[in-house]
Image (cartoon, rainbow, N blue to C red):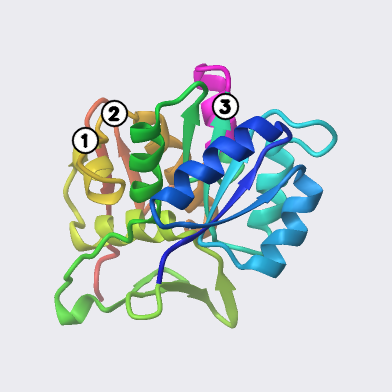
Amino acid sequence: MNARVLVVDDEPQIRRVVKATLAAQGYAVSEARSGEEAIERLNEDKPDLVLLDFNMPHMNGIETCRAIRMTSDVAIIMLTVRNTEREKVDALDAGADDYVTKPFSTPELLARIRATLRRASFSPAPELQRIALGEVEIDAQTRRAISGDRQIRLTPKEFDLLWYMITHANRTIPHRELLQAVWGPEYGGEVEYLRVFLNQLRKKIEPDPSNPVYLVTEPWAGYRLQLPERA
């Protein structure tokens, strides 16, 4: 079944062009003119991916992204007009999986959509199908994290990143390796992705996110997942 994409932008011309481009590639496309309308369409259309404009009146892209993330792990790509690190980090920190800077080319947009919809496929050893990090249990089959009776909401990219680190635990994984394993071979220099996503995961997994014991930064090199020692 073709992926369903919701295009959210207050500019009719951009919605029209993007919709035509994606429809020509076989995507099922719906559209929304505002953040408020996007929330309604999300519940009605159940898209696989949301293309979300950063700058919209009233409910802007950041506010819309955060509202979506409260209830959904749908893939989100933010469309931005300023190629600044602050704006990129704001988009990722709000819950976006990726961003594309306007004006963008059709091949670039399509490549980013494919990468964001991609689900990393790892083949861990049988004993790693379920693993505990302190009070949190990670289940590879259901792609869920659970703490006691509480389910921890992880976006698909957050889970892919966490599980790759689990299956390569106790060693430093370089930035480029992580980016290419989780986002795809076209990536490698987007270190800010990892910084933001690891901070998000620490808030969800670590007992004390400001002093992580599992998701460890190796300065200038990469990141390491430190498995707890078995008794």
Horizontal and vertical percent position of residue 22: 46, 47
Mark 2: few, some, or many residues within 10 Å (few <14, many ≥20)?
few
Question: Which numbered mark, 1 or 3, is in the foreground of this view?
Answer: 3
Front residue of this view, candidates 3 and 67? 3
CA distance separating discs 1 and 3: 24 Å
Say if the magenta span includes residue 106: no
Q: Which residues are magenta?
A: 81-92
Q: Main secondary structure of the magenta part?
A: helix
What is the number of the mark on residue 176?
Answer: 1
Front residue of this view, candidates 3 and 92? 3
Horizontal and vertical percent position of residue 119: 33, 61
Looking at marks 2 and 1 on the same chain, the residue that comes earlier in the sequence is marked by 1
Looking at marks 1 and 3 on the same chain, the residue that comes earlier in the sequence is marked by 3
For badge 3, the amino acid type reads: Thr
Name the quarter where the C terminus is drawn. Answer: bottom left
Q: Determine which residue is flagged by label 2.
A: 219
Question: Which numbered mark, 2 or 1, is in the foreground of this view?
Answer: 1
Let me know if residue 211 appears in the view: no
Please tell me whether residue 218 is drawn above or below residue 113 in the rendered image.
above
Let me know if residue 78 appears in the view: yes
Residue drawn 61% across and 63% down? 72
Please tell me whether residue 167 is drawn above or below residue 86 in the rendered image.
below
The local secondary structure at tag 3 comes to: strand
Residue drawn 55% across and 65% down? 153
Please tell me whether residue 199 is drawn above or below residue 205 in the rendered image.
above
Looking at marks 3 and 2 on the same chain, the residue that comes earlier in the sequence is marked by 3
Name the quarter where the N terminus is drawn. Answer: bottom left
CA distance separating discs 2 and 1: 14 Å
